Structures are given as C-alpha cells and as structure tokens.
Amino acid sequence: MSRIVKCAHIQASNPKHDGTVAEIKEAMIQKHIPLIEDAGKKGVQILCLQEIFYGPYFCAEQDVKWYQSAEPVPGPTTNRMAEYAKKYNMVMVVPVYEEAQAGVYYNTAAVIDADGTYLGKMRKIQIPHTWPGFWEKFYFKPGNLGFPVFQTAYAKIGVFICYDRHFPESARCLALNGAEILFNPSATTKGKSQYLWELEQPASAVANGVFIGANNRVGLEKPWEFGEFYGSSYFVDPRGKILVKGSEDKTELVVADLDLDVIREVRDGWQFFRDRRPEMYGEICKA
C-alpha cells in the first residue's frame, strides 16, 4: 500500500509596504491565514510557508528597524500557527526571523506537528551577502543547529533555507539523517537565480533519493523593487520529475500528493548511498 502524503506550499506577495514594522508583519500574517485555512480544508497534511513568511524580504536594505520583527522560537507566531496545525491536523513548516537573545538573530524555520506540538527548528546555515539586495549578513548569524530531521505525524522531514540549496552538502546531510521530504522555503528573484531554480533541486532530489519542496514568494516589494520574486513553487520526486508547479506571479496554494514508497524504489535501483565513499572525501573539508 502506497504511503501518500498531501503536501503544499503557500507562495504569497507582500500586501503592505508602509507603516510600522508591526503593522507590515501583521498584514502578511493576515494574508496567510485564509490560505492556511484553505490548505487545512483541502486535507493538506504538511504545509510549508515561504522564507520569513510574515514580512517583506527586508534584506534588500540594511536597516536596524527590521530587527523589531524578530521574535523567540518558539514564540508568538509559532504559537499562533500551532493553533491552525492542531485545528486541521496539519504539520506546518513556519519560517520566521528568530531573536535568540538581544542582538543575536537567525533566519529560522520552526516545525510544528499535526497536534500543534512544537518539534524544533532549523537555522539557515549558509548566509549570503551578495549584490544586488541580498544583504543577509547584516541580519542573520549563521545557523548552529546542523541539519535536524523531524519525525512528524506523516513523514520524516528536513528543512534547508533558500541559499542553503546552492550547497549540495545541505540536502545530503538531511537525507543521510533520514529525511524523506526536504522543504526549501526561499525568497529569490528573477535577476539572480531563476535559471537555477529547476536545475539544482531536481538534481539534489535524484542524488539523494528524496522528495523536495521548493517554495518562493511572488511580486515586487516596495520601496526596493530590486528584483521580482518569481514564485514557481514546486514539488519534485526522487527521479527529478517536477510533480506540480505554481505560477510566477500569483499568490496561491501549491499542492501535491507525494508517494513515499517511491523513495525505496529509486534508492534500491541506484544505490547511491551504498556506493558512497565518505572516507575518500576528506579533501573537501580542508579547503
């Protein structure tokens, strides 16, 4: 009997560009709530939100005011999302801006189980600081929790955030730690990475024999408008086949049924994990 898990992304544009940080944050949460409710009513079992889902991608500038949007994890927003997880018996991946202590901030994704239990968090490992408009080292300390895997009600899942996807070690660590589905919440624009969007993660899915869910926001965000977020959130299977893909410019729920039995079928055929030679790879850790 197949192990089918219904998974989904929410990809959304930012609805409010002025006002206080708190007002902008709340407007984005309010925009997500009907979409979260829709996912629950459609029977989604695992739902992934986009990178720092409750605000704009503020890394387009360097301004200390955005530190005000950070909060503890677990904390107010994860507790709020846990109510929906419990209501709909739905696992949720909730990316937020984490304040670990005064002046110490991380780009973090919390994982909430289907009964509303907080399972833990992943902190973004690799932090970019690249032109144009990805000034993340101003906001985030590099993650220090490794690549945890979470046993949820429906599957073993792992999270790696946006820029982490450009480092194949990220997906490999999660897969070796037992993850069946990897989620990559992102904020990425046409001018920077679109040519890689459907190249890297299908390849990672094949190399590791896992499903990957890639999530990206949509639209131009004021006042910066440094690049258009192109959506195109998708799920890809262990053979590298994209199962479903969202639009480039629309706020929407992107849903796919993932048959986890395919993982064993693919791995038994290719045997990449059997044939690994980690004792021969030490050189890459010395550079």
Image (cartoon, helix red, strand yellow):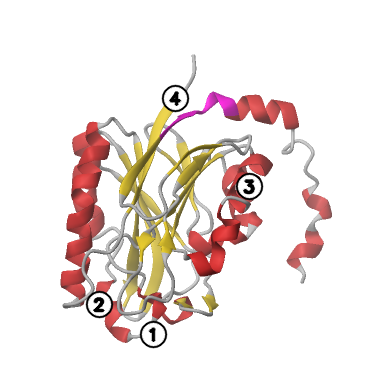
261 is within the stretch colored magenta: yes
- The vertical placement of 230 against 273, above or below, is below
Identify the residue position indicated by label 2 in the image: 68
Q: Position of residue 123 (x, y in %)?
A: 45, 62
Quadrant for the C terminus, please: bottom right
Q: Which residue corresponds to the image point at 34% horizontal and 34% vertical from the top-left? A: 45
Report, in whole angstroms, how far the alpha carbon at label 1 lies from the one at label 3: 32 Å
How packed mark 4 is, by other alpha carbons closer than 10 Å (few <14, some 14-19, many 20 or more), is some
Q: Position of residue 25 (x, y in %)?
A: 22, 67
Identify the residue position indicated by label 1 in the image: 62
**Quarter where residue 166 is shown:** bottom right
Of mark 4 and mark 3, the one earlier in the sequence is 4
Could you say whether the residue bearing mark 3 is in a helix, strand or loop?
helix
Of mark 2 and mark 4, the one earlier in the sequence is 4
Report, in whole angstroms, how far the alpha carbon at label 4 lies from the one at label 3: 21 Å
How packed mark 3 is, by other alpha carbons closer than 10 Å (few <14, some 14-19, many 20 or more), is many
Amino acid type, callout 4: Ile
Q: Position of residue 150 (x, y in %)?
A: 44, 43
Residue 204's label in the rendered image is 3
Along the horizontal axis of the image, is 38 left or right of 218?
left
Which residues, given as a range, are shown in magenta? 256-262
Amino acid type, callout 2: Gln
Is residue 115 visible to us here? no
Identify the residue position indicated by label 4 in the image: 4
Report, in whole angstroms, how far the alpha carbon at label 2 lies from the one at label 3: 35 Å
State the residue lying farthest toward the top.
1
Of mark 1 and mark 4, the one earlier in the sequence is 4
Q: Nearer the viewer, residue 153 or 234?
A: 234
Q: Nearer the viewer, mark 2 or mark 3?
A: 3
**Quarter where residue 39 is shown:** top left
Residue 209's label in the rendered image is none
